[in-house]
Image (cartoon, rainbow, N blue to C red):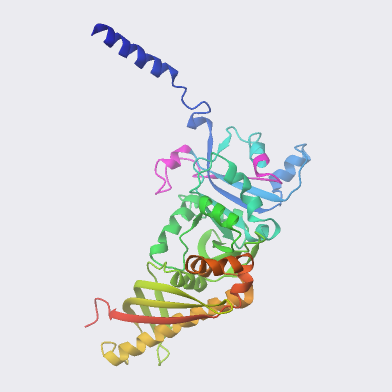
Amino acid sequence: MYSRYILSLLLAFILLVSQAGCWSSREIEELSMYTGLSLDKGEPSTVEQDLEKEGSRYFKKNKITATVQIVPKKSFGNAAKQAGGQGPNYINIAGTGDSVLEIFRQFSIRLDRPIIGHHLKVIVVSTELAKQQTMQQLMDFVLRDNDIRPSCLVFLSKGRAANTLVTKYKDEVPSFHILYMIRNHFRTSKLMRGINLSELDGLMHSKKSYILQNIIEAEGEFEFSGASIIKGDTGHWLGNLGQQDVDSIAWIKDDVEGGAIKTYDERNQPITYEIKSVNSKITTKVTEGNNISFHVKIESKGRLIEDWDDKLDPTKTQNMKKAEKEFEKEVTRRLKTLMHKLQSQYKVDVAGFGEHLYIEKPQTWKKVKDDWDYKFSQIPVTFDVKLTITDLGSSAE
């Protein structure tokens, strides 16, 4: 019994001392955590230009400017409030070149601590850069880097991406703010769920066209506004969709959690429908000769939450039915506007029709998948929209 006890202690000791731990681990105080990354067309900053004049030169082409947002350790302790202590809540540093990793290594000769991407939350790419370089090129390093988590979200910026990492509010960290804004999808379907690196990697490899949430900035204020289209076969930015277009895509894809539809009644007074539920179904039809068509049936329930027409009694059935028809017409109008942009203006499918064809008619999909965007532009799509007002809010009698 005693020998077994000694043997157990010996084995436990051997296991304890043989654990190597993380060979590359470093104390957090020795590192600079960056939570935001922006990528713009190459424009060396004033600091970079001054450093170059003093002799800071190495061979490069100024294709890209990468800006990282470094957050002091104290900011992680209470990230939701994004405040605390003395000193700035974040520091932005920019570098220009033609390799993201090389730019990051150059930061090591400008900062007292090397940067590390374990806590990278958001990446913002300017549309101007996405016109010039493919998304595959721009995301190559961040997808390969083991430090960067695949849950990091990716956005596009209509203006300079670095501007989205600056705020006028002193207790705010812009990268955290952007991350938390995306959670409001349950309030409005004008806002996408957000695409993370793992999902983006799959989209890029599929060669299908897709959309990424747009961010716009003005005077230190941010807003999610529409989406950017990335062409599947080229990997470049193709064009923009508006907020209502993003909303319409959510209706088609049965991805609406909340939101509102505003239109005008027969007296040209605003009326607003608050969405309680939406159910959408895409039906695929293939006739002889491989003629494809899609039909989208949408049913929604909600409340008449706002009515500026004080001349009509909304509690009367006939007035409620009229309001339902007005809302149905508005939703249908928005859907048709979206389809015109997708099929006539951009000639891309970013609303999931190809996925339904692949699932429902796999043999037909094999014949058209190589040139799907163009084929989709010629396919008829019809809609059947039914909205039902279930109540008038808590104040209506």
Q: Give how far across and how far down residue 43 sits, in percent.
A: 71, 52
Of 143 and 265, nearer the camera is: 143
Is residue 93 shown in magenta?
Answer: yes
Most distant residue in the left direction? 397
- Residue lying at 67% horizontally and 57% vertically, measured from the top left: 129
Magenta stretch, residue numbers: 73-102
- Residue lying at 57% horizontally and 33% vertically, measured from the top left: 113
Of 62 and 310, nearer the camera is: 62
Quadrant assignment, res 55? top right
Q: Give how far across and how far down residue 107 sits, in percent.
A: 64, 38
- Residue lying at 40% horizontally and 92% vertically, measured from the top left: 266
Is residue 265 shown in magenta?
Answer: no
Of 226 and 377, nearer the camera is: 377
168 relative to 46 in the view: left or right:
left
Quadrant assignment, res 384? bottom left
Most distant residue in the front direction? 288
Indicate the quadrant containing the C terminus: top left, top right, bottom left or bottom right. Answer: bottom left
Q: Is residue 385 visible?
A: yes
Q: Give how far across and how far down residue 97 sits, in percent.
A: 71, 45
Q: Give how far across and how far down residue 27 sits, in percent.
A: 49, 29
Number of numbered labels in the structure image: 0
Indicate the quadrant containing the N terminus: top left, top right, bottom left or bottom right. Answer: top left
Residue 15 position (above or below residue 333): above
64 relative to 218 in the view: left or right:
right
Residue 190 position (above or below residue 69): below
Quadrant assignment, res 231? bottom right
Q: Is residue 85 visible?
A: no
